[in-house]
Image (cartoon, coloured by chain):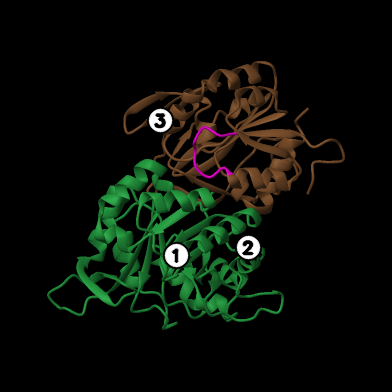
Amino acid sequence: MSAGGGPRPRVLVLDYGSGNLRSAQRALARVGADVTVSDDLDAARDADGLVVPGVGAYAACMAGIDGLGAAPVVRARLAAGRPVLGICVGMQVLYERGDEHGVRTAGIGALPGEVRRLAAPILPHMGWNTVRPPAGSVLFAGLPADTRFYFVHSYAAKADPDAGDTIGEHGEPFAAAVERGALAATQFHPEKSGDAGAHLLTNWLATLA
Amino acid sequence: MTVAVRVIPCLDVDGGRVVKGVNFTDLRDAGDPVEMARLYDAEGADELTFLDITASSGDRETTYDIVRRTAEQVFIPLTVGGGVRSTDDVNRLLRAGADKVGINTAAVARPELVRECAHRFGNQCIVISIDARRCPDPTGPRFEVTTHGGRRGTGIDAVAWAAQVVELGSGEILLNSMDADGTRDGYDLEMISAVRAEVDVPVIASGGAGELGHFPPAVGAGADAVLAASVFHFGQLRIGEVKSALRAEGVPVR
């Protein structure tokens, strides 16, 4: 799969000390992006697309992002209509705050609402699950309704169906993906979701100017 | 929307080579873990597990290289276990491209290691592997934790141990029945049920898979994922067949 015949879109995967970035880098390169993994904020401002990854604890991820001073860059990009893709905890930190074991941590605040522990008998929600995207979704265009994506998380934000959020369910409904202007985010890991994930990343790359 | 039961092939890797295994006609080198990983991915495996049985710690570099090469070519989750002793070992495997790391003997020797790893890397990437057997001592627990590949009993109650490691931060339990392992007589269903009843994290059933009919009962006993090694290596069962067998019993699969 490739993003088309034009110049390869320049994507920066933000390196703020969170886990395994190699997979995101390789998965994006596989579908035709020119990918850099970097903590350089100027490069993060200039890239055609910015990916905010994230695994582990909300507070630890925000500490990494704040340590780098990256939150204003993310907000500035979105204000200017420049694409940002959050993945897993990288999606969660786009909300106003996270609540883990009663500890509240301020997020980047690009999305309204709070990330909370799912009410489910078995956590983490780990494995391949289906999602319900809205009609006209760009990220999920061309993917069959029963497509499964790989999730690993215990926390999530509430879906806002009026805003066109994609709904997932594990114990309760949650926001599996959001698409709001330049902001895209997935609670699942497209970089670990095989061909379905590659298809979604191709769709995202096609939105980059 | 129900999360699918995962079917996980496990590769035993020694010094960078797959241990045992059949020469699949569509592979150039069935001894290459990366090639095998690609084959299993193409066949629909939901995750991959590498169990590093390399005896010499000097050969560990080879393992990191295998993990790196696999992560570059396979876009499904990869768990690596075997010989993991410290948070630094976990860090190196994650940085090489592993998504989850399995810890076994080192956790039994020092349970705090589980908490340290979960705190540093998140519980979602810490899998505690439990090699358990039915306890030969009638005064002991029903299921007992073993170490050293099942050769040494510890007297530790496997069900209580599972609950303890979850409390310490393990995000998943890989439950391997040492009695069933290698027998191909089926999973130890009572052991799965006993652990399932005590923990609220995913449980991977391991040990004993020999035929298609063995998989649905493991799920019925409470497994969230089913792992097998030899039946896949020897080409006796294919991933797709296992999924069809599960689907026929109403189990959601990818």
Per the image, label 2 sits on a secondary structure element best described as helix
Query: Which region of the structure is painted magenta?
Result: A14-21
Residue B20 is left or right of residue B167, and the answer is: right
Q: Are marks 1 and 2 in contact (CB under 8 Å)?
A: no
Which chain is painted in brown?
A
| Residue A15 lies in the magenta stretch | yes
Colour that chain B carries in the picture: green
Same chain, labels 1 and 2: yes
The residue type indicated by label 1 comes to Gly
Q: Nearer the viewer, residue B86 or B61?
A: B61
Q: CA distance from mark 1 to mark 3?
A: 37 Å
Residue beneath disc 2: B41
Mark 3 crowdedness (10 Å alpha carbons): few <14, some 14-19, many ≥20:
some
Query: Do discs 2 and 3 belong to a common subunit?
Result: no
**Percent from the top left, x then y, of residue A208?**
75, 30
Who's the residue at 22% across and 76% down the image? B135
Give coordinates of residue A12: x percent, y percent: 65, 33
Residue A113: give x, y in percent of width and height. 48, 23
